[in-house]
Protein backbone atom coordinates (compact mmCIF):
# COMPACT_ATOMS: atom_id res chain seq x y z
CA UNK A 1 0.00 0.00 0.00
CA UNK A 2 2.81 2.44 0.89
CA UNK A 3 4.46 1.71 -2.45
CA UNK A 4 1.34 2.71 -4.38
CA UNK A 5 0.77 5.79 -2.20
CA UNK A 6 4.35 7.01 -2.71
CA UNK A 7 3.97 6.52 -6.45
CA UNK A 8 0.77 8.57 -6.39
CA UNK A 9 2.44 11.39 -4.44
CA UNK A 10 5.40 11.47 -6.85
CA UNK A 11 3.36 11.33 -10.03
CA UNK A 12 0.39 13.55 -9.06
CA UNK A 13 1.28 15.82 -6.12
CA UNK A 14 5.02 16.52 -6.36
CA UNK A 15 5.65 19.86 -8.15
CA UNK A 16 6.57 19.27 -11.76
CA UNK A 17 9.79 20.39 -13.37
CA UNK A 18 10.04 21.35 -17.03
CA UNK A 19 12.46 19.24 -19.04
CA UNK A 20 14.06 19.73 -22.44
CA UNK A 21 13.90 16.29 -23.99
CA UNK A 22 15.86 17.27 -27.09
CA UNK A 23 16.14 19.94 -29.76
CA UNK A 24 17.01 20.14 -33.44
CA UNK A 25 18.51 22.90 -35.61
CA UNK A 26 17.75 23.02 -39.30
CA UNK A 27 20.57 22.90 -41.83
CA UNK A 28 19.46 24.43 -45.16
CA UNK A 29 20.54 22.76 -48.37
CA UNK A 30 23.52 24.02 -50.34
CA UNK A 31 21.10 25.67 -52.78
CA UNK A 32 20.62 28.40 -50.20
CA UNK A 33 24.30 28.84 -49.33
CA UNK A 34 25.64 32.34 -50.05
CA UNK A 35 29.17 33.65 -49.54
CA UNK A 36 29.68 37.32 -48.75
CA UNK A 37 31.03 37.99 -52.22
CA UNK A 38 28.04 36.22 -53.79
CA UNK A 39 25.71 38.24 -51.54
CA UNK A 40 27.09 41.49 -52.97
CA UNK A 41 27.06 40.18 -56.53
CA UNK A 42 23.42 39.01 -56.28
CA UNK A 43 22.42 42.30 -54.66
CA UNK A 44 24.08 44.23 -57.49
CA UNK A 45 22.51 42.11 -60.26
CA UNK A 46 19.06 42.43 -58.67
CA UNK A 47 18.95 46.11 -59.55
CA UNK A 48 17.18 46.75 -56.25
CA UNK A 49 20.03 48.78 -54.74
CA UNK A 50 21.97 51.81 -55.86
CA UNK A 51 25.79 51.92 -55.74
CA UNK A 52 25.82 53.61 -52.32
CA UNK A 53 23.64 50.86 -50.79
CA UNK A 54 25.80 48.14 -52.35
CA UNK A 55 29.00 49.72 -51.04
CA UNK A 56 27.50 50.15 -47.56
CA UNK A 57 26.38 46.51 -47.30
CA UNK A 58 29.76 45.32 -48.53
CA UNK A 59 31.51 47.37 -45.83
CA UNK A 60 29.19 46.08 -43.09
CA UNK A 61 29.67 42.45 -44.16
CA UNK A 62 33.45 42.74 -43.96
CA UNK A 63 33.21 43.72 -40.28
CA UNK A 64 30.20 41.58 -39.36
CA UNK A 65 31.87 38.40 -38.12
CA UNK A 66 29.75 36.43 -40.61
CA UNK A 67 31.54 33.73 -42.60
CA UNK A 68 31.23 32.39 -46.13
CA UNK A 69 28.67 29.59 -45.65
CA UNK A 70 25.48 31.21 -44.37
CA UNK A 71 22.06 30.72 -45.98
CA UNK A 72 19.57 33.03 -47.68
CA UNK A 73 16.44 32.50 -49.82
CA UNK A 74 17.49 33.53 -53.35
CA UNK A 75 14.01 34.96 -54.02
CA UNK A 76 14.96 38.13 -52.15
CA UNK A 77 17.39 39.00 -54.95
CA UNK A 78 14.74 38.91 -57.69
CA UNK A 79 14.55 42.31 -59.43
CA UNK A 80 11.73 44.36 -57.97
CA UNK A 81 11.37 41.99 -54.99
CA UNK A 82 8.65 43.01 -52.55
CA UNK A 83 7.72 41.48 -49.22
CA UNK A 84 4.81 39.09 -49.73
CA UNK A 85 3.07 36.39 -47.76
CA UNK A 86 3.77 33.55 -50.20
CA UNK A 87 7.56 33.95 -50.13
CA UNK A 88 7.54 34.20 -46.35
CA UNK A 89 5.31 31.14 -46.03
CA UNK A 90 7.53 29.09 -48.33
CA UNK A 91 10.70 29.99 -46.44
CA UNK A 92 9.05 29.36 -43.07
CA UNK A 93 7.76 25.96 -44.20
CA UNK A 94 11.22 24.87 -45.36
CA UNK A 95 13.08 25.73 -42.15
CA UNK A 96 10.33 24.96 -39.62
CA UNK A 97 9.26 21.58 -41.01
CA UNK A 98 12.90 20.64 -41.49
CA UNK A 99 13.70 21.31 -37.83
CA UNK A 100 10.50 19.65 -36.57
CA UNK A 101 11.07 16.51 -38.65
CA UNK A 102 14.57 16.13 -37.22
CA UNK A 103 13.30 16.68 -33.67
CA UNK A 104 10.51 14.12 -33.95
CA UNK A 105 13.00 11.61 -35.32
CA UNK A 106 15.42 12.30 -32.46
CA UNK A 107 12.85 12.02 -29.66
CA UNK A 108 10.67 9.27 -31.10
CA UNK A 109 7.61 11.24 -29.98
CA UNK A 110 4.51 10.96 -32.15
CA UNK A 111 2.52 14.06 -33.06
CA UNK A 112 -0.52 12.60 -31.27
CA UNK A 113 1.46 12.72 -28.02
CA UNK A 114 2.04 16.49 -28.22
CA UNK A 115 -0.48 18.56 -26.27
CA UNK A 116 0.72 22.01 -27.25
CA UNK A 117 1.46 22.41 -30.96
CA UNK A 118 0.19 23.84 -34.25
CA UNK A 119 -1.11 20.72 -35.98
CA UNK A 120 -4.64 19.66 -35.29
CA UNK A 121 -7.91 21.01 -33.86
CA UNK A 122 -7.65 19.41 -30.41
CA UNK A 123 -4.19 20.83 -29.69
CA UNK A 124 -3.70 24.16 -27.94
CA UNK A 125 -2.22 26.43 -30.59
CA UNK A 126 -0.26 29.63 -29.89
CA UNK A 127 1.54 32.00 -32.27
CA UNK A 128 4.06 34.24 -30.53
CA UNK A 129 6.16 37.10 -31.86
CA UNK A 130 9.39 37.58 -29.95
CA UNK A 131 12.58 35.84 -28.99
CA UNK A 132 12.92 32.15 -28.16
CA UNK A 133 13.15 32.54 -24.39
CA UNK A 134 9.66 34.08 -24.34
CA UNK A 135 8.35 30.99 -26.14
CA UNK A 136 10.02 28.67 -23.62
CA UNK A 137 8.45 30.64 -20.77
CA UNK A 138 5.02 30.43 -22.41
CA UNK A 139 5.45 26.70 -22.98
CA UNK A 140 6.37 26.22 -19.31
CA UNK A 141 3.22 28.07 -18.19
CA UNK A 142 1.09 25.98 -20.53
CA UNK A 143 2.69 22.76 -19.32
CA UNK A 144 1.98 23.81 -15.72
CA UNK A 145 -1.66 24.12 -16.72
CA UNK A 146 -1.59 20.73 -18.47
CA UNK A 147 0.37 18.29 -16.26
CA UNK A 148 1.89 15.26 -17.92
CA UNK A 149 2.12 16.84 -21.37
CA UNK A 150 4.61 17.50 -24.15
CA UNK A 151 5.07 20.90 -25.79
CA UNK A 152 6.77 21.70 -29.08
CA UNK A 153 8.43 25.11 -29.44
CA UNK A 154 9.79 26.42 -32.74
CA UNK A 155 12.02 29.46 -33.17
CA UNK A 156 12.97 30.83 -36.57
CA UNK A 157 14.09 33.77 -38.67
CA UNK A 158 12.19 34.40 -41.91
CA UNK A 159 14.50 36.62 -43.96
CA UNK A 160 11.82 37.24 -46.59
CA UNK A 161 9.96 39.46 -44.11
CA UNK A 162 12.95 41.54 -42.96
CA UNK A 163 14.65 42.10 -46.31
CA UNK A 164 14.95 45.74 -47.41
CA UNK A 165 15.52 47.04 -50.95
CA UNK A 166 15.91 50.75 -50.26
CA UNK A 167 18.60 53.32 -49.59
CA UNK A 168 18.24 54.02 -45.85
CA UNK A 169 21.45 52.83 -44.20
CA UNK A 170 19.78 52.16 -40.83
CA UNK A 171 17.43 49.74 -42.60
CA UNK A 172 20.19 48.05 -44.60
CA UNK A 173 21.90 46.66 -41.48
CA UNK A 174 19.50 43.71 -41.02
CA UNK A 175 20.18 42.57 -44.61
CA UNK A 176 23.79 42.01 -43.66
CA UNK A 177 23.14 39.96 -40.52
CA UNK A 178 19.86 38.00 -40.67
CA UNK A 179 20.04 34.53 -42.20
CA UNK A 180 17.77 31.49 -42.67
CA UNK A 181 17.46 29.11 -39.75
CA UNK A 182 15.11 27.37 -37.33
CA UNK A 183 15.22 25.30 -34.17
CA UNK A 184 12.60 23.01 -32.66
CA UNK A 185 12.52 22.11 -28.96
CA UNK A 186 10.52 19.36 -27.25
CA UNK A 187 9.55 20.14 -23.65
CA UNK A 188 7.86 17.90 -21.12
CA UNK A 189 6.70 18.07 -17.51
CA UNK A 190 6.16 14.34 -17.09
CA UNK A 191 8.04 13.15 -14.01
CA UNK A 192 9.43 10.03 -15.67
CA UNK A 193 10.92 12.09 -18.50
CA UNK A 194 13.61 13.32 -16.14
CA UNK A 195 15.51 10.11 -16.83
CA UNK A 196 15.71 10.64 -20.57
CA UNK A 197 15.71 14.45 -20.82
CA UNK A 198 18.88 16.38 -21.65
CA UNK A 199 18.21 19.46 -19.55
CA UNK A 200 16.01 20.76 -16.74
CA UNK A 201 14.66 24.31 -16.83
CA UNK A 202 15.78 26.23 -13.74
CA UNK A 203 15.06 29.95 -14.24
CA UNK A 204 13.57 32.31 -16.80
CA UNK A 205 13.99 36.08 -16.47
CA UNK A 206 12.24 38.38 -18.94
CA UNK A 207 12.95 42.12 -19.21
CA UNK A 208 10.84 44.39 -21.40
CA UNK A 209 11.55 48.11 -21.76
CA UNK A 210 8.65 48.90 -24.08
CA UNK A 211 7.29 51.65 -21.85
CA UNK A 212 10.39 53.70 -22.64
CA UNK A 213 9.85 55.44 -25.99
CA UNK A 214 13.55 55.34 -26.92
CA UNK A 215 13.69 51.60 -26.25
CA UNK A 216 10.58 50.95 -28.33
CA UNK A 217 11.83 52.97 -31.30
CA UNK A 218 15.37 51.53 -31.43
CA UNK A 219 14.09 48.53 -33.48
CA UNK A 220 10.70 48.60 -35.17
CA UNK A 221 9.35 48.05 -38.66
CA UNK A 222 8.43 51.11 -40.70
CA UNK A 223 8.42 52.55 -44.21
CA UNK A 224 11.15 54.76 -45.64
CA UNK A 225 10.56 57.93 -47.67
CA UNK A 226 9.87 55.80 -50.76
CA UNK A 227 7.31 53.62 -49.01
CA UNK A 228 9.61 50.58 -48.72
CA UNK A 229 9.32 48.61 -45.50
CA UNK A 230 12.38 47.91 -43.40
CA UNK A 231 13.67 47.29 -39.91
CA UNK A 232 15.80 50.30 -38.92
CA UNK A 233 18.40 49.98 -36.18
CA UNK A 234 18.65 53.13 -34.09
CA UNK A 235 21.96 54.65 -32.99
CA UNK A 236 20.59 54.26 -29.43
CA UNK A 237 20.57 50.48 -29.79
CA UNK A 238 23.72 49.71 -27.81
CA UNK A 239 22.88 52.08 -24.96
CA UNK A 240 19.30 50.81 -24.78
CA UNK A 241 20.49 47.21 -24.99
CA UNK A 242 23.00 47.82 -22.22
CA UNK A 243 20.29 49.12 -19.89
CA UNK A 244 18.05 46.13 -20.67
CA UNK A 245 20.91 43.67 -20.08
CA UNK A 246 21.77 45.35 -16.77
CA UNK A 247 18.17 45.11 -15.60
CA UNK A 248 17.94 41.47 -16.64
CA UNK A 249 21.13 40.20 -15.03
CA UNK A 250 20.42 42.25 -11.89
CA UNK A 251 17.21 40.25 -11.55
CA UNK A 252 18.88 36.98 -12.51
CA UNK A 253 21.86 37.45 -10.16
CA UNK A 254 20.15 36.65 -6.83
CA UNK A 255 18.73 33.46 -8.36
CA UNK A 256 22.05 32.02 -9.53
CA UNK A 257 25.01 33.77 -7.88
CA UNK A 258 26.87 32.74 -4.77
CA UNK A 259 26.00 34.87 -1.74
CA UNK A 260 29.47 36.43 -1.64
CA UNK A 261 29.03 37.77 -5.18
CA UNK A 262 25.56 39.09 -4.38
CA UNK A 263 26.92 40.85 -1.30
CA UNK A 264 29.67 42.64 -3.23
CA UNK A 265 27.20 43.79 -5.87
CA UNK A 266 24.64 45.17 -3.44
CA UNK A 267 27.33 46.89 -1.37
CA UNK A 268 28.40 48.95 -4.38
CA UNK A 269 24.75 49.50 -5.31
CA UNK A 270 23.95 50.95 -1.88
CA UNK A 271 27.12 53.04 -1.81
CA UNK A 272 25.97 54.76 -5.04
CA UNK A 273 29.37 54.41 -6.64
CA UNK A 274 29.65 55.48 -10.27
CA UNK A 275 30.92 52.07 -11.36
CA UNK A 276 28.99 49.10 -10.03
CA UNK A 277 30.72 45.83 -9.15
CA UNK A 278 30.07 43.35 -11.95
CA UNK A 279 29.39 39.94 -10.40
CA UNK A 280 31.46 37.06 -11.74
CA UNK A 281 28.83 35.13 -13.65
CA UNK A 282 31.48 32.60 -14.63
CA UNK A 283 31.04 31.24 -11.09
CA UNK A 284 27.35 30.61 -11.78
CA UNK A 285 27.53 29.10 -15.26
CA UNK A 286 29.78 26.73 -17.14
CA UNK A 287 28.41 27.87 -20.50
CA UNK A 288 26.87 30.92 -22.15
CA UNK A 289 24.84 31.09 -25.35
CA UNK A 290 24.39 34.75 -26.30
CA UNK A 291 22.28 35.68 -29.31
CA UNK A 292 24.70 35.98 -32.24
CA UNK A 293 23.45 39.32 -33.54
CA UNK A 294 26.75 40.80 -34.74
CA UNK A 295 30.43 40.87 -33.87
CA UNK A 296 30.06 44.25 -32.19
CA UNK A 297 27.18 43.04 -30.03
CA UNK A 298 29.16 39.98 -28.90
CA UNK A 299 32.19 42.17 -28.19
CA UNK A 300 30.06 44.39 -25.93
CA UNK A 301 28.59 41.39 -24.10
CA UNK A 302 32.02 39.90 -23.51
CA UNK A 303 33.32 43.21 -22.20
CA UNK A 304 30.35 44.00 -19.94
CA UNK A 305 30.08 40.51 -18.43
CA UNK A 306 33.88 40.04 -18.37
CA UNK A 307 33.64 36.68 -20.13
CA UNK A 308 36.62 34.74 -21.45
CA UNK A 309 37.04 33.79 -25.12
CA UNK A 310 36.10 30.23 -24.23
CA UNK A 311 32.70 31.37 -22.93
CA UNK A 312 32.13 33.31 -26.16
CA UNK A 313 33.26 30.56 -28.52
CA UNK A 314 29.84 29.06 -29.26
CA UNK A 315 28.30 32.48 -29.95
CA UNK A 316 31.09 33.63 -32.26
CA UNK A 317 31.27 30.33 -34.15
CA UNK A 318 27.50 30.41 -34.68
CA UNK A 319 27.61 33.97 -36.00
CA UNK A 320 30.39 32.99 -38.41
CA UNK A 321 28.76 29.78 -39.66
CA UNK A 322 25.03 30.63 -39.63
CA UNK A 323 24.74 34.40 -39.17
CA UNK A 324 21.96 35.87 -37.04
CA UNK A 325 19.12 33.34 -37.11
CA UNK A 326 17.19 35.34 -34.52
CA UNK A 327 15.44 33.28 -31.82
CA UNK A 328 17.00 30.02 -33.01
CA UNK A 329 20.56 31.38 -32.65
CA UNK A 330 21.07 30.23 -29.05
CA UNK A 331 20.05 26.69 -30.04
CA UNK A 332 22.63 26.49 -32.81
CA UNK A 333 25.09 27.51 -30.09
CA UNK A 334 23.95 24.76 -27.74
CA UNK A 335 24.26 22.32 -30.65
CA UNK A 336 27.84 23.55 -31.09
CA UNK A 337 28.63 22.88 -27.43
CA UNK A 338 27.19 19.39 -27.72
CA UNK A 339 29.10 18.71 -30.92
CA UNK A 340 32.32 19.68 -29.12
CA UNK A 341 31.25 17.44 -26.21
CA UNK A 342 31.59 20.30 -23.75
CA UNK A 343 28.36 19.63 -21.84
CA UNK A 344 28.86 17.61 -18.66
CA UNK A 345 26.25 16.34 -16.22
CA UNK A 346 25.40 19.08 -13.71
CA UNK A 347 26.66 21.93 -15.93
CA UNK A 348 24.65 25.15 -15.79
CA UNK A 349 23.93 26.92 -19.05
CA UNK A 350 22.64 30.47 -19.56
CA UNK A 351 20.99 31.50 -22.83
CA UNK A 352 20.59 35.25 -23.37
CA UNK A 353 18.48 36.74 -26.15
CA UNK A 354 17.35 40.25 -26.96
CA UNK A 355 15.30 42.04 -29.58
CA UNK A 356 12.75 44.69 -30.42
CA UNK A 357 10.74 46.13 -27.59
CA UNK A 358 13.43 46.48 -26.27
CA UNK A 359 13.63 42.99 -24.74
CA UNK A 360 16.40 41.13 -22.96
CA UNK A 361 15.64 37.62 -21.75
CA UNK A 362 17.66 34.92 -20.04
CA UNK A 363 17.02 31.27 -19.39
CA UNK A 364 18.97 28.84 -17.22
CA UNK A 365 19.22 25.10 -17.86
CA UNK A 366 20.89 22.35 -15.87
CA UNK A 367 22.38 19.43 -17.80
CA UNK A 368 20.94 16.13 -16.62
CA UNK A 369 23.55 14.06 -18.41
CA UNK A 370 26.88 14.40 -20.13
CA UNK A 371 26.00 14.92 -23.77
CA UNK A 372 27.93 12.91 -26.28
CA UNK A 373 27.75 13.68 -29.98
CA UNK A 374 24.09 13.93 -31.09
CA UNK A 375 22.90 11.81 -34.01
CA UNK A 376 22.28 14.71 -36.37
CA UNK A 377 23.18 18.37 -35.94
CA UNK A 378 24.37 21.05 -38.40
CA UNK A 379 27.91 21.16 -37.00
CA UNK A 380 28.52 17.52 -37.90
CA UNK A 381 27.47 17.83 -41.52
CA UNK A 382 30.33 17.49 -44.04
CA UNK A 383 31.59 20.81 -45.33
CA UNK A 384 30.92 21.36 -49.03
Image (tube, rainbow, N blue to C red):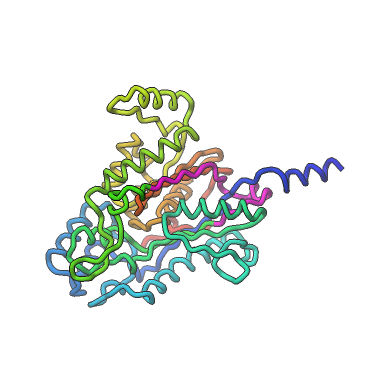
Identified at 57% across, 48% down, the residue is: 198
Q: Nearer the viewer, residue 73 or 231?
A: 231
Q: Is residue 187 magenta?
A: yes
Q: Residue at x 77, y 46 (%)?
A: 8
Name the image quarter holding the N terminus.
Answer: top right
Residue lying farthest left?
51
Check the picture and name the quadrant holding the C terminus: bottom left
Q: Is residue 184 visible?
A: yes
Disc tally is 0
Q: Quadrant of residue 87?
A: bottom left
Q: Is residue 14 above or below residue 67?
A: above
Segment colored magenta: 186-208
Q: Residue at the right extreme? A: 1
| Image coords of residue 330 (percent x, y) | 42, 51
Taking 352 as reference, is 108 left or right?
A: right
Q: Nearer the viewer, residue 155 or 214?
A: 214
Residue at (38, 74) in percent of width and height: 85
Quarter of the image where one finds residue 151? bottom right
Give the residue displayed 44% in from the left and 37% down from the top: 251
Q: In the visual, does 352 lie left or right of 231?
A: right
In the rendered structure, does residue 145 fall within the stretch colored magenta? no
Q: Nearer the viewer, residue 74 or 35?
A: 74
Amino acid sequence: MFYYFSDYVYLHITPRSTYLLDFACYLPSNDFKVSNAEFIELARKSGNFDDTAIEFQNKVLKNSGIGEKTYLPKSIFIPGHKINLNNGREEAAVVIFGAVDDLLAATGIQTRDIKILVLRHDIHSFNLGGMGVIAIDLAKDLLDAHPGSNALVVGTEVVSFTWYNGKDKDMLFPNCFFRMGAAAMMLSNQHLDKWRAKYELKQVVRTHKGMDDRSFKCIYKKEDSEGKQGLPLSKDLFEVGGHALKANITTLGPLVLFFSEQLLFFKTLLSKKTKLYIPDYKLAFEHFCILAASKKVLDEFQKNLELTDEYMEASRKTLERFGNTSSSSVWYQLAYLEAKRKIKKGDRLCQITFGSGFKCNSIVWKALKSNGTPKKIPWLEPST
